[in-house]
């Protein structure tokens, strides 16, 4: 536990160092107002990373989250066009996202197909469904109602609703992971599936639950995304699933499953969010930006990998001494 | 074959000859589009009908496949050849796949031109581009300059697609060439939104932070211009930062009304359909010839000049603003 704690401390320190570095080139970046803006901008990434974390903990991966987000976002925009009230839209996208996640989960659970294969397939299917629904047409700002667009931006106590939603979900997932049987099951299933079975945990059912959670969060984020950027089309959040996985990995979620914390996951997302928001303002050539953000991810992961490596336990002390 | 059968066959042949004779007076121009049911092409058809009315003796056959495939267009063109139309003006789904079929059409004396999306040179007599890179490059900076104070210099930034987008890079290059003609514009930088809504939005926010005195963002990409307009709205800088560039009226309508974008440009499909019809008419009538350097009149649009690849640029991109956005946002 002390190792885990220190890893998060290291990540927090890395974030502070990063902020200091950015501030030395562009002081305006670290003003409270701008940091709040960065937090808001990173909210979708945090939401998806939390769902992805649950999936990765159970030794799976969900590549369909961005497509799920795009499909739910499009459905939200279409429902808004049909005059459905906002609370109903919110419930519908969460339910739809969960259902799309359940499709992934069922295939992993009941058919035993590797999750990377399942979600690669559903990723394409979900994007294709958007095309079928709209024929490739866009839904634009003027086709959305004012209330639909305004909800995530409404400022409450200094922060937009979107940020509050992300913070609430962070708290909710933290409770789920640390205080419930399901949370422990996520860790157990990924940490040692065989031992989990012997303690009476169904591996498949736990993986299914993780996919449903990731799907529901993706669905919710779908609405937030579409309302924030005021546009819905087939390709929104294209390639975003890789950012989500990267945020988890930076946050110290072991890609082999079983280990990782909510705090690490959130900080991983923030780390990536800060880089994404800082690169446009620090005056680095766009041709370097991709290389820099890739290098930052690699450094963070390399750092994690070394601190994560368990030192082997010596079981034959005498033999050790003899050599 | 019975006597009656023979008589009927003769009668049918006679009738066929008569109809051909009747149609010879009326020129039939086929407007072949990428697919039916696309607003952009429906608007082009409107322009073609306008040209037909102006010319008087022209009938437009508006047709195309139901999905945007080259196979579908080949089928459509084959049936047009069978109908012996006088001219085919096509916006191609594939540069090369249509060439053999269109060659066959030209062998039968049918005039073939391409417009909007071109066909390889051997498959058509000429190609009509909606605009040219230099006209577009000039237009996007002109749009920014027109809405800025005439004296002094104002900071303007460019939000492009990806660093490797050929179209955008060419337009920006052309824009920089003519930039000295607009002394009130100072281009301070180019950023790349990768044609992703979220990245473009973030880059636009970054521009407004890096250049607090920024007066305009030029986004020559339809994803970028929408994202930039939203970022300006969210930053509360409507009226201070003007977003302009290239976009589609249906996607930009909301942002023009909110004032985030005073004006933007894109080619006008009505003019395009009109000009393509005019060109097809003159070439089929043989009162113009498609050869490098030739000038061909296209009615109210003036005239076009063919370059060494037998390609011509129609006109400046058409400017959309609060005055005409409603009319076009329902079209495309």
Image (cartoon, rainbow, N blue to C red):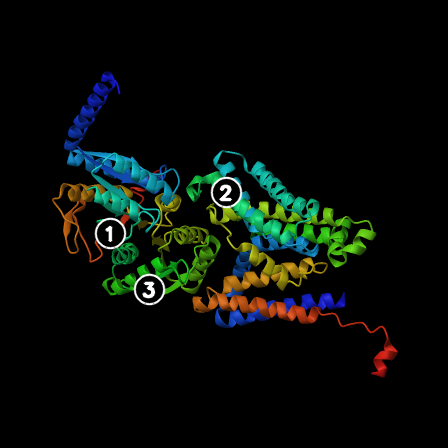
In the image, residue B306 lies at what x, y percent? 19, 54
> Can residue B187 be seen?
yes
The reply to whether dot 1 and dot 2 touch (C-beta < 8 Å) is no
Of all chains, the one bearing label 1 is B
Q: CA distance from mark 1 to mark 2?
A: 35 Å
> Can residue A282 be seen?
no
Residue A1's image quarter?
bottom right
- Give the class, few, some or many, for how many residues have Cα within 10 Å of label 1's Cα (few <14, many ≥20): many
Please check whether the numbered discs 3 and 1 fall on a single chain.
Answer: yes
Quadrant where the C terminus of chain B sits is: top left
Extreme residue toward the right, this view:
A318
Q: Is residue B69 left or right of residue B15?
A: right
In the image, which is nearer the foreground, mark 3 or mark 1? 1
Q: CA distance from mark 3 to mark 1?
A: 22 Å
* Front-lying residue, B29 or A223: B29
The reply to whether dot 3 and dot 1 touch (C-beta < 8 Å) is no
Residue at 60% x, 50% y is A119
Q: Secondary structure at mark 2?
A: helix
Of all chains, the one bearing label 2 is A
Question: Which residue lies under the disc numbered 2?
Answer: A130
Question: Which residue lies under the disc numbered 1?
Answer: B316
Question: Which residue lies under the disc numbered 3?
Answer: B187
Please check whether the numbered discs 3 and 2 fall on a single chain.
Answer: no
Residue A223's image quarter?
top right
In the image, residue B252 lies at what x, y percent? 38, 46
In the image, residue A96 lies at what x, y percent? 60, 40
| A28 in relation to B22, above or below | below
């Amino acid at each position: 536990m002390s190792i885990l704690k220190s890893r998060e401390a290291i990540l927090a320190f890395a974030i502070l160092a990063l902020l200091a570095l950015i501030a030395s080139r562009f002081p305006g970046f670290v003003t409270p107002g701008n940091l709040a803006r960065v937090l808001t901008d990173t909210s979708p990434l945090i939401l998806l990373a939390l769902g992805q974390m649950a999936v990765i903990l159970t030794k799976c991966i969900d590549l369909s989250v961005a497509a799920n987000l795009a499909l739910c976002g499009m459905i939200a925009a279409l429902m808004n066009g049909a005059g459905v009230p906002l609370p109903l839209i919110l419930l519908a996208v969460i339910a739809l996202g969960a259902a799309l996640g359940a499709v992934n989960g069922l295939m992993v659970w009941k058919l035993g197909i590797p999750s990377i294969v399942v979600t690669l397939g559903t990723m394409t299917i979900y994007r294709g469904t958007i095309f079928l629904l709209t024929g490739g047409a866009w839904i634009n700002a003027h086709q959305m109602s004012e209330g639909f667009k305004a909800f995530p931006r409404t400022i409450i106590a200094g922060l937009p609703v979107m940020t509050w939603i992300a913070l609430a979900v962070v708290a909710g997932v933290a409770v789920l992971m640390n205080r419930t049987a399901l949370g422990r099951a996520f860790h157990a299933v990924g940490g040692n599936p065989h031992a989990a079975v012997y303690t009476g945990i169904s591996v498949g059912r736990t993986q299914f639950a993780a996919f449903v959670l990731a799907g529901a969060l993706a669905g919710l984020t779908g609405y937030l995304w579409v309302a924030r950027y005021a546009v819905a089309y087939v390709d929104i959040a294209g390639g975003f699933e890789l950012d989500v996985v990267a945020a988890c990995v930076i946050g110290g979620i072991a890609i082999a499953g079983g280990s990782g914390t909510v705090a690490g996951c959130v900080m991983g997302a923030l780390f990536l969010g800060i880089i994404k928001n800082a690169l446009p303002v620090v005056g680095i050539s766009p041709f370097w930006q991709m290389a820099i953000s890739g290098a930052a991810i690699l450094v963070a992961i390399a750092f994690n990998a070394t601190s994560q490596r368990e030192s082997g336990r010596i079981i034959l002390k005498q033999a050790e001494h003899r050599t | 074959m019975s006597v009656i059968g023979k008589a009927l066959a003769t009668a049918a042949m006679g009738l066929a000859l008569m109809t051909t004779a009747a149609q010879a007076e009326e020129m039939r121009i086929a407007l072949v589009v990428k697919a039916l049911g696309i607003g952009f092409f429906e608007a082009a058809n409107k322009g073609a009908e306008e040209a037909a009315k102006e010319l008087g003796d022209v009938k437009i056959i508006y047709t195309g496949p139901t999905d945007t495939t080259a196979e579908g267009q080949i089928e459509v063109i084959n049936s047009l050849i069978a109908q012996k139309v006088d001219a085919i003006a096509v916006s191609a789904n594939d540069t090369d796949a249509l060439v053999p079929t269109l060659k066959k059409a030209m062998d039968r004396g049918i005039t073939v031109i391409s417009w909007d999306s071109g066909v390889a040179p051997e498959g058509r007599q000429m190609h009509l581009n909606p605009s040219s890179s230099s006209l577009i490059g000039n237009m996007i900076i002109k749009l920014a300059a027109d809405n800025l104070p005439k004296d002094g210099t104002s900071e303007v930034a460019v939000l492009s697609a990806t660093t490797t987008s050929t179209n955008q890079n060419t337009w920006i290059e052309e824009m920089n060439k003519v930039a000295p003609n607009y002394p009130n514009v100072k281009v301070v930088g180019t950023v790349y939104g990768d044609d992703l809504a979220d990245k473009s939005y973030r880059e636009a926010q970054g521009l407004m932070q890096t250049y607090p005195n920024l007066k305009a963002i030029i986004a020559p990409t339809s994803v970028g211009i929408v994202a930039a307009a939203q970022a300006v709205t969210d930053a509360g800088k409507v009226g201070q930062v003007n977003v302009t560039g290239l976009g589609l009226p249906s996607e930009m309508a909301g942002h023009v009304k909110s004032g985030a974008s005073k004006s933007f440009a894109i080619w006008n499909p009505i003019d395009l359909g009109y000009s393509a019809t005019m060109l097809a008419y003159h070439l089929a009538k043989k009162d113009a010839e498609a050869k490098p350097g030739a000038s061909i009149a296209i009615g109210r649009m003036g005239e076009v000049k063919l370059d060494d690849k037998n390609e011509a640029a129609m006109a400046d991109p058409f400017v959309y603003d609060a005055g005409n956005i409603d009319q076009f946002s329902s079209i495309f």
